[in-house]
Image (cartoon, rainbow, N blue to C red):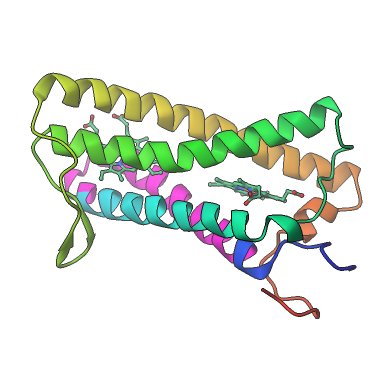
């Protein structure tokens, strides 16, 4: 593949690591209803998602001049739909764990990044806000799930109808060129 044909290695690794963590946290959230002891793990994985999503955004800005061109023709509706979907995915990746963190604090509880390192409380206990934030956390989770479904469908649509370019350039395996 030519230069800039693939995403930089750091972006590919962060993409798949975050995908794994997000899918795991949806699975944990689903199991939470019957097994409340999983909440600590859900909060911890969520905190890592927030941290890694911020690192991913900073890394993307750092590498913005070395990104491959869109698989969609510049200026077409699909080009702008892709930009919007990717922008919203980033927004949800940051906002969803932040809402969970705020909800937890408003309920009077804390969260841990790893054993021995607690996250600071962002707000005081507030029962009313806790319910509202919990609702927003649930709504944002549905939006994120919908975006991921559309995103995966678009990736496979390009794979089936195109040269397979989109998927190939996001796969995590190192290429022969110097990797970043
Ligand atoms: C991308 C990351 C996250 C995703 C996708 C996610 C998703 C979800 C989902 C789908 C639920 C079930 C919603 C419901 O039925 O009420 C849930 C519940 C919950 N999440 Fe998250 N979550 C994330 C991060 C976090 C974080 C970082 C925290 C706290 C530090 C957190 C705290 C909670 C709590 C406390 C509940 C129970 C809510 C309630 O009882 O109303 N979540 N989460
Ligand atoms: C939690 C799940 C996922 C999230 C949040 C996510 C998010 C993103 C984002 C924001 C981009 C744009 C590149 C960037 O700025 O980093 C991207 C690219 C991409 N994603 Fe995902 N993704 C997820 C899961 C998946 C899955 C399961 C697939 C596999 C089918 C996939 C396939 C791709 C492909 C092929 C690209 C490159 C598109 C291009 O050609 O430019 N993603 N993803």
**Does the magenta run of residues contain 17?**
yes
Q: Residue at x 66, y 60 (%)?
A: 63
Q: Is residue 90 above or below residue 3?
A: above
The x, y position of residue 158, in whole percent, is 83, 43
Q: Residue at x 81, y 45 (%)?
A: 70
**Does the magenta run of residues contain 30?**
yes
The quadrant of the rendered image in which ligand 1 is seen is top left
The x, y position of residue 129, in whole percent, is 18, 22
The x, y position of residue 65, in whole percent, is 74, 57
The x, y position of residue 168, in whole percent, is 79, 60
Q: Magenta residues?
A: 12-39
Could you say which quadrant of the image residue 6 lies in? bottom right
Question: Does the magenta stretch mainly form a helix, a strand or a loop?
Answer: helix
Could you say which quadrant of the image residue 117 lies in? bottom left
Q: Is residue 130 left or right of residue 14?
A: left
Q: Residue at x 33, y 30 (%)?
A: 137
Q: Is residue 92 left or right of residue 48?
A: right
């Amino acid at each position: 593949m030519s230069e800039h044909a693939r995403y930089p290695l750091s972006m590919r690794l962060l993409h798949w690591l975050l995908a794994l963590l997000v899918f795991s946290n949806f699975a944990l959230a689903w199991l939470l209803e019957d097994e409340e002891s999983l909440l600590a793990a859900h909060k911890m994985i969520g905190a890592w998602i927030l941290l890694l999503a911020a690192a991913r955004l900073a890394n993307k800005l750092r590498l913005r001049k070395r990104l491959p061109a869109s698989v969609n023709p510049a200026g077409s509706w699909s080009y702008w739909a892709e930009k919007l979907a990717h922008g919203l995915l980033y927004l949800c990746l940051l906002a969803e764990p932040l809402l969970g963190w705020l909800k937890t604090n408003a309920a009077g509880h804390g969260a841990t990044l790893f054993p021995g390192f607690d996250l600071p409380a962002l707000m005081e206990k507030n029962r009313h806000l806790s319910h509202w934030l919990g609702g927003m956390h649930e709504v944002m989770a549905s939006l994120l799930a919908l975006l991921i479904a559309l995103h995966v469908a678009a990736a496979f649509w390009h794979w089936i109808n195109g040269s397979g370019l989109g998927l190939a350039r996001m796969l995590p395996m190192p290429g022969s060129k110097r990797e970043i």
